[in-house]
Image: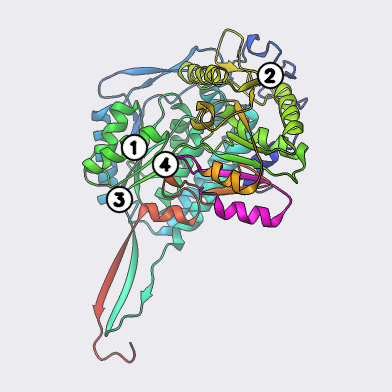
Amino acid sequence: MAAASRISSFLSRSLLSKGRICGVGRSVVCSYTTAAALEKPFTPSINVNYTKLLINGNFVDSASGKTFPTYDPRTGDVIAHVAEGDAEDINRAVSAARKAFDEGPWPKMTAYERSRVLFRFADLIDQHTEELAILETWDNGKPYEQAAKIELPMISRLIRYYAGWADKIHGLTVPADSPHLVQTIHEPIGVAGQIIPWNFPLLMFAWKVGPALACGNTVVIKTAEQTPLSALYAAKLLHEAGLPPGVLNVVSGFGPTAGAALATHMQVDKLAFTGSTETGKIVLELAAKSNLKPVTLELGGKSPFIVCKDADVDKAVELAHFALFFNQGQCCCAGSRTYVHESVYGEFLEKAKARALKRSVGDPFVAGIEQGPQIDSEQFEKIMRYIRSGVESGATLETGGERIGDKGFYIQPTVFSNVKEDMLIAKDEIFGPVQSILKFKDINEVIRRANTTSYGLAAGVFTQDIDTANTLTRALKVGTVWINCYDVFDAAIPFGGYKMSGQGREKGIHCLSNYLQVKAVVTPLKDPAWI
């Protein structure tokens, strides 16, 4: 099965399987009304071996000697203490990357040699899927089944995709109006600074590192302070695959210190950031005030999911549920504004409510669990504030809205009806399991309302009419439109946003241009046979 279809097919399978993950023996939770979050959590069966910074091929302590705790969102307990990088550590990492680019073997290797390293890395990811998925679930709270069966195969596929591109990056011979040989050469941009978020730590690691290395760059990547563990493990595997020292450096730390130091560093040639729009503005400003390094941004979203009057309501309900609740709702392109045509609104609402009530919430290591905890207390409290805001602003709370248990950061799947555009739950990126359902009358109205937002990351369209689909596809001001599907993330499909959802594209051929410079070379031709 292609990697692109794995997430999409996730919604159509019954996840209430009878199997067990990692030897877990508890029974499957059948709805969020159970005491799933009150059960004793499963203890992962691996040791956390990589908690230091990775600089110049070695795991080292931070210059200050400081560490910070990374927490288990199922309980709030500390998993491990991780080296806390700051400006001095960013300096060390950038120096290593600078030397590796200017003097080291990576950009001087043949493109084929670089591709072989990346292919070996992809093989190692497949061989270590269980360890990586356990770390991802333990540190992030996402279901193990999602991490192991969906995300890890997508990651190795994406690395292979860019490994395949490494020796296919070439320029052109350009016809000139005068007797000159004109060539274009695509060169690596240099040291790439990369800052990744906590919601898909390994996937974002791959989206950033894969194309940068394939193009011959060196990298300094700052992980999210909430989820540092899986990237350190993956970086260790990359070095096992033959990556030279200094080519990839990983600094765990906080945005105002390590992140800001990376964004402002004068020896960083390019910056890539994934995170909130608010932080993206800061990153862009810092980059501009330093050496005017180019910046790509993959930022927030408030994506419309449009259910037309001809929709198969049962299928639309399931797809809209998936579009919003996947990954605990912590997804930048989540279909968080569910627009439903008035003719099917009542039926859709009742079925959407029933589907939310059936959603399995609990320990993400248990087989069949669809929803684990939110990432941390800060995000938990933010979501609960938005839920209270929805009630106070007059939306109808159909189901959910409460905490599950008293330990960890579990929230009931929540559904609001009678939502209006001026409500915060319809305007702001909640980043949680809160579905807002809005009613519309005709296609022109829904186009206008769907586009009335500062975001433009993605949209979903559910219709059986090809003309309706084509009209909406062209009218919606977003970077991706999914028609009768959602969250299809093939390695070759570009991803990025319009408006305040970002700049540039991730994945696919378009991402390569983020990490390349184009040089024109002009040479006179003496007595050419032809021009």
Please name the amino acid that badge 3 sits on.
Gly
Please name the amino acid that badge 1 sits on.
Lys
Q: Nearer the viewer, mark 2 or mark 1?
A: 1
Q: Residue at x 26, y 38 (%)?
A: 286
User: Disc 3 or 4, which lies upstream in sequence?
Assistant: 3
User: Disc 4 or 2, which lies upstream in sequence?
Assistant: 2
How far apart marks 2 and 1 lie (CA) works out to 43 Å
Label 2, on which residue? 24
Q: Residues within 10 Å of mark 3 (few under 14, many from 20)?
A: many
Q: Are marks 3 and 4 in contact (CB under 8 Å)?
A: no
Label 1, on which residue? 281
How far apart marks 3 and 2 lie (CA) works out to 46 Å
Nearest the camera: 396 or 256?
396
Please name the amino acid that badge 4 sits on.
Met
SS type, badge 2: loop
Residue 190 shows which numbered tag?
3
SS type, badge 4: helix
User: Disc 3 or 2, which lies upstream in sequence?
Assistant: 2
Q: Which residues are magenta?
A: 452-479
Q: Residues within 10 Å of mark 4 (few under 14, many from 20)?
A: many
* Magenta residue check for 377: no
Residue 500 shows which numbered tag?
4
How far apart marks 3 and 4 lie (CA) works out to 27 Å
